[in-house]
Image: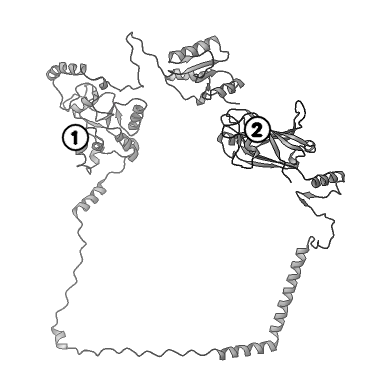
Amino acid sequence: MPEVKIKHIVSFSSEDKSHKAENLLGNDTTKKWRCEPGEKQACVVFQLEKCTKISSIDIGNDGSAFVEVLVGRSGQESVKYQVLLVASSFMSPQESRVGTSPTRVRIFSHDKLSSDVAAEQWDIVKIVCTQPFNKRVSYGLTFVKLHSLSEKGVESMDDSASLPSDVKPKIFGSFKMKDDNDTSKSSTFHPGKLMQLAKKDESSESKIKKEHMRRSRSPDARELEEKRRKLDRKATPKQPRPPATPKQQRPPATPVNFDQLKTKTPPPKPQKREPPKQPPSSAKKRKAEKKKPPAKPYDQILGGVIFVISGFQNPLRGDIRDKALRMGAQYRKDWTRDSTHLVCAFPNTPKYRQVEGAGGRIVRKEWIDDCAKMKRQMPWKKYAMNADVSSSSSSSEFEDASSEDEPTVNVNPAQSDNEDPYGGSTDEGGDTEDEIEKLKPKIEEDNQNDNVYDASTDEENGAVNQPSADGLPPLPDFFEHKQFLLYGDFEQSIQRLLTRCIVACGGKISKYMNDDIEYVVTEQDWDQEFDRALSTNAALVFVKPSWVYDCGAQQLLLPSQPYLISHT
């Protein structure tokens, strides 16, 4: 089918700077036409050289979801277009959003076109491309090829249209199908012919086999077979046998002196072999392995450990505490005489200095993590925060782990059982009342001169804002530098509550839409106005009022995905 020549481009909706509409006139498929980003519909109009009947269309896509082809005639004030090819899909919604298979090619034959419109001649072709599933991409076409039937083909189609259905010739593309009633000499094949030929071959083979069996059973055939075997035996020469090898002669026997045999000493008795002695180190290791206690249950790994946490804030503080409690440890908010370990984030905290002066064990949080990971109590010296203790731990790396399973408790044996376990001094040896009174002024002076970085970070329920100079707590600022727009008709109480939450947390509310707005709070479903707003500001987020309420309740900026307005 000859290709219809396109004379020039009459008009187009828009074009990209790099991919112009005139690229569709050439044969170079690497050049393409694309519209500007954000357009809902793009179209291009072609002027053909003459009025022609269009029989098929080849379209190469470039990111369009649907393509529609319209035709018309020039010479009119307003061209009335008719649909030659209805809007055909080139990309699914999923492919459009992800951007896969954007250059699909489709060939529309004569049966895919509108039969009434394809029967007439046209000289203007309008192609309309749409991409409603992805509004941020630039889309268009790679190429467009129009085909028409030759004059002979048109005449044959017209003639065949006037014939009845049983007389019309069967045409498949440019080939003419053979009629079923054609009995020409070249038509030698008919149904069942292959089976007949196979049966003839089988019958001829069976006849040959039967004739061969009949001849082999006759006496003349047997005599001939015996003569043939005798001739074959005579023809094959006999192979000479290899010469026999002479037998090996034994060496002459030496004479035996019986007198020497009588005076000969008996042979020594074989000594018993003793097993090789193993080095004492390996023997000790084996004994130690045998004496190793069985693995403890998970909830008893840190049995007897009483720990205190310093320098960590929630939620990490809560995770460390819960992980240690699940392994059987006990938790104290402050350091007491029965505490064994201080899990510290960094040195020189108030608790760090207190425990260091008391001679307690100060470890990093990795000690808790590795105990849970290895499912046994790890040696604490490897995780000591004190440099002196951690360096000395390298020399005692292979110390017995059993001593680590039973941590020492710094309890004064002279202490009464009825005394409060959470009171008293934190020093190991215990101070007298006179010594404590002497040290009180010095301790108070040190506390006043402490650096601001030594402040405690041991809040159990998250960070608490310190009160301001006027005694009121400061307001949160997680909405700072964020602008909001309240869209739709809200009740007066709801609008007042939303305004109060946003402004109190540092946000700003605008009365009109502008480029600085980030969040649109609305109770309505998806609206066409949202699409227009996204076309001007693609970073807008449409959320429900519950997102603002939950952020205020949690005192932090929550993810907005669960509160988005669904795009229908």
Q: Residues within 10 Å of mark 2 (few under 14, many from 20)?
A: many
Secondary structure character of the magenta stretch overall: loop
**Observer able to see residue 90:** no
Q: Which residue is mark 2?
A: 129
The one nearer the camera, 265 or 111, is: 111
Image side of residue 92 versus residue 504, left or right: right
Residue range of the region highlighted in magenta in the rendering: 309-313
Chain-order first, disc 2 or disc 1: 2
Q: Is residue 198 above or below residue 427?
A: below
Observer able to see residue 245: yes
Residue at 24% of width from left, 41% of height from top? Answer: 402
Is 473 placed left or right of 85 in the picture?
left
Say which amino acid is labelled 2: Cys
The image quadrant of residue 310 is top left
The amino acid type found where label 1 is placed reads Asp
Magenta region includes residue 243: no
Residue 109 lies in quadrant: top right
Helix, strand or loop under label 2: strand
Residue plotted at (75% across, 26% down): 78
- Residue pointed to by mark 1: 388
